[in-house]
Image: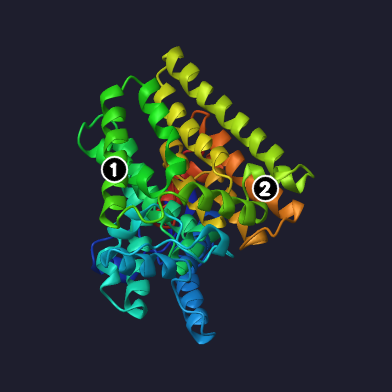
Amino acid sequence: MGKRAGVGGIAVFRPSVNATAIERGCEGETVPLLSAPSRSGLGLAATRLFLGVLPPALLVLLVVARYLTGTKLGFDYKPLWDASRHVLHGASPYPRPEALIDEHQFVYPPLAAFLFAPLAALPFAVAAPLLAVVELAATGLTLRVLGVRDWRCYGVVLLWYPVLQNFLLGSITSLLALGLAVVWRYRDSRRGAPVTLAALIAAKIFLWPLLVWLGASRRWLIGVRALGLAIAGLFLSWALIGFAGLGSYLRLLDELSRLEQWKSYSAVALGMALGLTGGESRALALAACALVLLAIVLVQRRGREDADRQAFVLAIAAAFFFSPIVWTHYLALLVVPIAITRPKLSPIWFVPLAMWASYGQSDGHFWRVALGFSIWAVVLAASLRPAWRFPAFGRRVALPSAPLRAEGAYAAHRRGG
């Protein structure tokens, strides 16, 4: 029961004090009342479920499903694994251009086969899962190198279909993304940047627009070193296999483009889906690439504070336009421009999730080609803009650490609060 207390001649009813609280010397504290979960609490729980629990659960589920269906891991890695074993014996890893029938054949420069030679010493059943683990670690390390500390960004990226496909198929795109992150982070280093960029270009030639970015940013020495190391690496790797396949390599790439460009998500595929011929689509894509390269130079000449970042993003865009084939896992590279521009969670991190609507190859369907093309084009265009603040994602809501005390509420009432 409460007690009456005279205050200014007026009798008021004072709330009783919890006996246990008196014993502990905490007079005034009452047993907390049960209350319904707040919106902020429900939102935090949903975030932890969607971005904390779902990504690893989905990853495990996909791996288990592949093994139960007999598909297993490393479909794209198998040609690279075979090529590594070939080059270690001095043999050519390349098929004849006229014998090229699908994408399940080795078409990388030979340096890639040498770089992955250590894995080739292992049985494929062991090498493929090991590479998958390396790819997964590379994705997390990419975000770490770029200064992303928001755990939610890691969760979103692991829900991207391009990242998951890269993990399951054993493509090297996640390693390329890590290389891009290292080049950006250590862009002024005369040792780390040239070596990393040289390895990127030697493994995937379509990344050469990064050399234009280095030149436009007056990092001539780094660019020259990177180009020299890339050429030296290509020459040496081809020399080790007696220059096997060198004479027909360009014809091999041309035949590969003719067979597969129409079912990817490239600018060439979009042109062909609109009814243009392969040659016309390729010409338009190269024209777009040239315009983006020009934009790199113009942006750097303006000399604004954010010019270097914008030029770097434009170099990645030029690489996408230059490549006649853009597979789904290529979109895993988008983590780099997003992380550089917005290291905290914002709507742009969710855009690549739309690739779940068109997983796999586009097969020339216009809506699928347009969707994949739009995703990488929109992400790269949005990454050119300065970082925006999105209150819905970045606002912190202060939550009370304990329910309002009865004594405090009574005192507030007395003061007119």
Residue 329 in the image: above or below residue 295: below
According to the picture, the residue beneath numbered tag 1 turns out to be 196
- Element class at badge 1: helix
Q: Is residue 332 visible?
A: yes
Tell me which amino acid carries mark 1: Thr
Residue at 46%, 60% in the rendered image: 158
Residue 21 in the image: above or below residue 407: below
Residue 193 position within the rendered picture, expressed as x and y whole percent measured from the top left: 27, 37
Specify which label sits upstream in the sequence, 1 or 2: 1
Residue 36 position within the rendered picture, expressed as x and y whole percent measured from the top left: 56, 64
Which quadrant holds the N terminus?
Answer: bottom left
Residue 195 in the image: above or below residue 255: above
Total label count? Answer: 2
Residue 142 position within the rendered picture, expressed as x and y whole percent measured from the top left: 35, 49
Which of these two is toward me, 36 or 296?
A: 296
According to the picture, the residue beneath numbered tag 2 turns out to be 269
Q: Residue furthest top?
A: 302
Q: Is residue 55 left or right of residue 36?
A: left
Which of these two is toward me, 67 or 125?
A: 125
| Residue 38 falls in image quadrant | bottom right
Q: Residue furthest right?
A: 275
Residue at mark 1 to residue at mark 2: CA–CA distance: 30 Å
Residue at 53%, 29% in the rendered image: 385
Tell me which amino acid carries mark 2: Ala
Mark 1 in CB contact with mark 2 (< 8 angstroms): no
Which of these two is toward me, 370 or 113?
A: 113
Q: Is residue 186 visible?
A: no
- Element class at badge 2: helix
Residue 346 position within the rendered picture, expressed as x and y whole percent measured from the top left: 52, 43
Residue at 42%, 47% in the rendered image: 204
- Colouring scheme applied when the structure was drawn: rainbow
Q: For the residue carrying disc 2, how many other residues have a C-alpha within 10 Å: few (<14), some (14-19), or many (20+)?
A: many
